[in-house]
Image (cartoon, grey):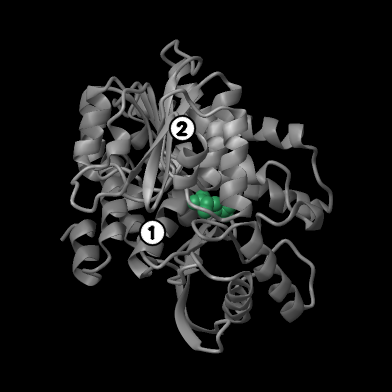
Amino acid sequence: MDIYERIKNRDPNETEFHQAVFEVVESIKPVLEMHPEFRSANILERIVEPERVIMFRVPWMDDGGDIHVNRGFRIEMNSAIGPYKGGLRFHPSVNLGILKFLAFEQVFKNALTTLPMGGGKGGADFDPKGKSNEEVQRFCQSFMLELARHIGPNTDVPAGDIGVGAREIGYLFGMYKKISNEFTGVLTGKGLNWGGSLIRPEATGYGSVYFAAEMLNARGETLEGRRCLISGSGNVAQYTMEKLIELGGIPVTFSDSNGYIYDEKGVDREKLDFLMELKNIRRGRVREYAEKYSEAVYTPVDPDLKYNPLWDHAAHCAFPSATQNEINGIDAGNLVKNGILVVSEGANMPTTPEGMNIFFDSGILYGPAKAANAGGVSVSGLEMSQNSMRLGWPAEEVDSRLKMIMKNIHKTCLDTAEYYGTPFNYVNGANIAGFVKVAQAMLDQGLV
Ligand code: GLU
């Protein structure tokens, strides 16, 4: 039985994990043919099984005195090339299968960064939306009370993801410090005045734009004057728009879970400042943007639609920056029909397998998440380095390192895809390059 069938039979409910594994297995077939040593060491069977899965109860009390119980997780997926590293997601959809897919992807993504980081992911099915600051604080403290015994700056270094930003990292860090009696770089995405790295908040969005610019450059094109569709309105979407504006691109859409904005004239610096204040300070909804700027149109989510109308506007570039499987086959078809040149994935696994096949057939430039959104975890890696050295680099230094890392990832993917006979297939390039690095390290370290 092949590995894909085996994981499906073993954990039949983990559909997102199956999807992530299927994609990698398809890409690395030629590698396994060329490397009998990977086959005889059963690297593939070992790499799809987490080294450790931690699941725990997270009890917390709301402002009214009622008690709630959420489920907390940490998947320690692979430590062949460094301590487990990856974000924490707080969202009601969180379950074991989703976190396993994220942890699995993280292993290859982190390998591509060239920094010494293994892969992990964690989180809880807690919904921060609508919760008071005090409730979020109590939840984070309860979550860390258990997680603390499993992590450490040389063991496992969590960070943010959906629903976990600077505020949550602050509460988590405070509790870790109290329990361990140690001020150490155990989390990344920390506040700038207590060990965080400059450019970390910007890094995923900036990186995804740098990656798109590299892909376009490979075909003699630039972002200048390009109309860009962005989904999401969190940290990744915001800094994607910031960098696009800086480089002469024109962001025309963004969204939240209730609906999306189409701004024909484009989001400029002033409008982006309004959106950032709305989202980050007031924790409001994107609908308010259209109330402030009359040229913008707000469209609420229609649960009966089989496609997302955000992806059905004429544009040159798409930056999915919301969540997994947000571009299905119909959406991908609409993007291609409307003349898209490049897709750069800021979110993790935002395109379904049907969507991916449409991108492959059309020959557009398609930068998969593992490569395109690796900027975030890269600067997390740089935050770890700065913490170890007990110093902080200036923003220009971090940004230039980020740019260099994204350039290198792009080149690695491009060269690897070419070498394996699938030129410009960045999916194959990313999967193969990430896999070979981790597989080689696993071989070197024996059966552990
Ligand atoms: N959650 C982000 C990702 O998907 C960042 C992880 C990190 O900084 O450790 O890569």
* Callout 1 touching callout 2 (CB < 8 Å): no
Position of 90 compared to 172: left or right? left
Near-viewer residue (344 or 106): 344
**Residue at image point 65% right, 70% down:** 172
Is residue 160 something that shows in the picture? yes
For residue 26, above or below residue 405: below
Q: Is residue 257 left or right of residue 396?
A: left
Residue shown at the point (36%, 56%) measured from the top left: 43
Q: Which residue is mark 1?
A: 47
Q: Give the residue type that dot 2 points to.
A: Ser
**From what the image shows, is residue 300 above or below residue 120?**
above
The picture places residue 102, in percent across and down from the top left corner, at 41, 57
Q: Which of the marked residues, 1 or 2, is nearer the chain's N terminus?
A: 1
**Residue 394, above or below 404:** below
Residue at 18% x, 60% y: name it: 5
Residue 115 visible in the shown view: no
| Circle number at residue 144 | none
Q: Quadrant of residue 351?
A: top left
- 10 Å neighbourhood of mark 1: few (<14), some, or many (≥20)? some
Q: Position of residue 302 (x, y in %)?
A: 25, 49
Secondary structure under the numbered disc 1 in the rendered image: helix
Nearer to me, 168 or 445: 168
Residue 24 x, y percent position in the rendering: 31, 47
At label 1, which amino acid type do we have? Ile
Residue 415 in picture, x, y percent from top left: 43, 25
Give the SS element for disc 2: loop
Which of pointers 1 and 2 indicates the residue nearer the eye? Answer: 2
Marks 1 and 2 sit apart, C-alpha to C-alpha, by 51 Å
Q: Which residue is mark 2?
A: 294
Residue 14 in which image quadrant: bottom left
